[in-house]
Image: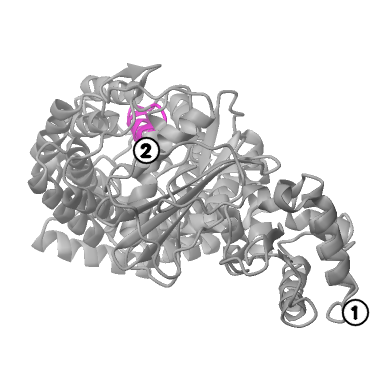
Amino acid sequence: MGETGGRDLRPAANNLEHFGPDRIREQLRSILSSQAFRGAQAQQAFISYVVGESVAGRGHLIKEYLIGIEALHRGDAFDPRLDPIVRTQASKLRTRLRKYYETEGATDPLLIEIPRGSYAPVFRPAGQGTSEFDIPSLPGPSVPAATQSSPQPATNPQGLRSLTLLAFLVVLAVAGTGAAAFYALQSEWWEQIRPHEAPSVAVMPFIQVGDRNDRDSLRVGLADEVINALRGVPGLEVVASTPTLPLKGKLLEIPGIGSNLHVQTELLGFMRTFGDKLRIDVQLNTSRGKDHLWSGSYERDAVEVRSVPSEIAGAISSVLGLDVPSSPATILAGRPARVRVPANPSAYQNYLKGLYFWNKLTPEGLRLAVQYLGQAISEDPSFARAYSALANCYVMAPQVATAPPPEVLSKIRATALRALQLDSTLGEAHFSLAIAAEYEFQWALAEAEFRKGLALSPGNSVGHLWYAKYLALLGRKEEVLAHRRIAAELDPVSPYAVQAVGGYFSVMGQYDKAIQHFSSALALDPGFGLAHQGLGVAYLLKGMPDEAIAELQQADRLMSGPRRRALLGYAYALSGRTDEARRILDEFLVQASAESFPALAIAQIYIGFGDKDRAFEWLQKAIDQRDLDVTLLWDSPYESLRSDPRFTALLRRMKLA
């Protein structure tokens, strides 16, 4: 059990041992025969079932689905996502219980309550200082958490109560057709995911509880740090990615998501803030059956959360019977040790903010990420992961903010090398060095760096995706699929990873499979522009121009910029809508004459028009710009150019022939 402000908030097995089954059954009979419950057959059945299960020692198995089937007789077709009967009756039951204990049961010595957000009953003596609005933690194996950083006991301000994470899932989950549609789209995808035979955990996105949303960067950053810490546990397979995308909240609508991901356990996390106080509640459950394994609560001042990710990883490793290396520099089984705690709390806060804004993948987000990470480094010059994250910002600058690669190459190398000087276990820094080598067409060096990075961070899905992009540039198509599949298996709920697999099938001419994967990505996040872009290209190549243009227009709205508009112009040209294509091309030519502009965007529209001379002219300029989206040996639009001798000349220019 983790920290709870110096006080154990868990009732001992819900006080079953204290009262005994006979007293509890007697109290239940009093409730059922009362005036308050007369005629309330559904609520009578509900409370009889849950109390009976608890007395029989099966309280941990009380689930919404089972209540609907066994107590409320909804039939085998009952789907709690679509039918709210259990939640409705639970609310009515709480109202009747309150009425009973205010009137007929006012002198009863034993109270039976159904805490809000939970279906398992709680038994307590009348007059005890808790209420039905408190949600007790579920009983489970006790695991000692690390000692609190402050020697004083943590305070427990008004409202800072024990949070049962599964209970909040009931409150936060949004039942409806969205989850059903997600299942329908993903059913084939789930079947492709490799089962995890080793101890494994799926990390669900951390959720902010309450009205405050000004600490979103802290919530997201902490979840990311927990993932990194867990990836440092030898022998543990982690299914998760950077959890910033708001789409991942919809996973909470889907019960048993871990079983679909073929992992053994799920980690759920909630964060609550009260002024400068922060409380993080986490719970580890089995993915099938939702058996509770462990829960922990960590109360800190908001600026003193640095050690929490490592504490959580240590507790989980103990529960699962795994060892965490004592030295952060130790490498076991090809994996780095758990995350090293930075020395400066303010630097850590700025680092988390930097991660948050980096993952927005927008020009403004990237600018803010560089700013916050720079502050983190100035406050703690020994903070290796801040240097590595800053290198990632510079890596993405040419793609997100259209910064010319020559302007960022030296920054990528300087920050990545400094990160490795401080911590040689950071695989992510090697990924940055690999991309820096790609920008200079040093392909052998790039591959060596990618392999070093993957050896150190094999669970990093983004690293596998970036390596797949390298393989695409070299035309090694089957290897592209292998690493995109690995990335998608590591993070099956990432629209970025799922759509990347769709991109492979699109290039290979398997358009229906491609469309299915892009649609799955959009089921995860309807606003994910890259998936709309990929779907549009797949429709275009399949000969469905109207559908293609609609998707590419949506991609342009969601991720405005020359790269998206270029594909739209290409589709207009191929579809015979030449006036609209020409309008975009003329706009690009004006911009290119006045400022730095991605030449590839212009080349793509000329390819759509079939103007090979100008297409080759602008492709040569794009190569001179070191544009890594010039995937000559990969993407389908270049097919019309490959028989031309000038195509081989372009490959030589990129040192690919």
Tell me the chief SS of the magenta region.
helix
Is residue 361 shown to the viewer in this render? no
Q: Secondary structure at mark 2?
A: loop
In the picture, the quarter occupied by the C terminus is top left
Residue 140 screen position, x and y as percent: 60, 41
Mark 1 highlights which residue? 38
Tag 1: residue type?
Answer: Arg
- The foreground one among 617 and 440 is 440
Q: Residues within 10 Å of mark 1 (few under 14, many from 20)?
A: few
Numbered circle sitting on residue 107? none
In reply to whether residue 463 is colored magenta, the answer given is yes
Q: Secondary structure at mark 1?
A: loop
Q: Earlier in the sequence, mark 1 or mark 2?
A: 1
Residue 415 screen position, x and y as percent: 13, 37
Tag 2: residue type?
Answer: Ala
Q: Is residue 386 above or below residue 264?
A: below
Q: Is residue 110 above or below residue 489?
A: below
Relative to residue 79, is residue 642 drawn left or right?
Answer: left
Relative to residue 405, is residue 544 drawn left or right?
Answer: right
The structure residue drawn at horizontal position 12% and vertical position 32%, both measured from the top left corner, is: 418
Q: Residues within 10 Å of mark 2 (few under 14, many from 20)?
A: some
| First to last magenta residue range | 458-475
The structure residue drawn at horizontal position 67% and vertical position 68%, both measured from the top left corner, is: 126
In reply to whether residue 511 is colored magenta, the answer given is no
Numbered circle sitting on residue 146? 2
- The structure's colour scheme is one colour
Residue 506 screen position, x and y as percent: 51, 42
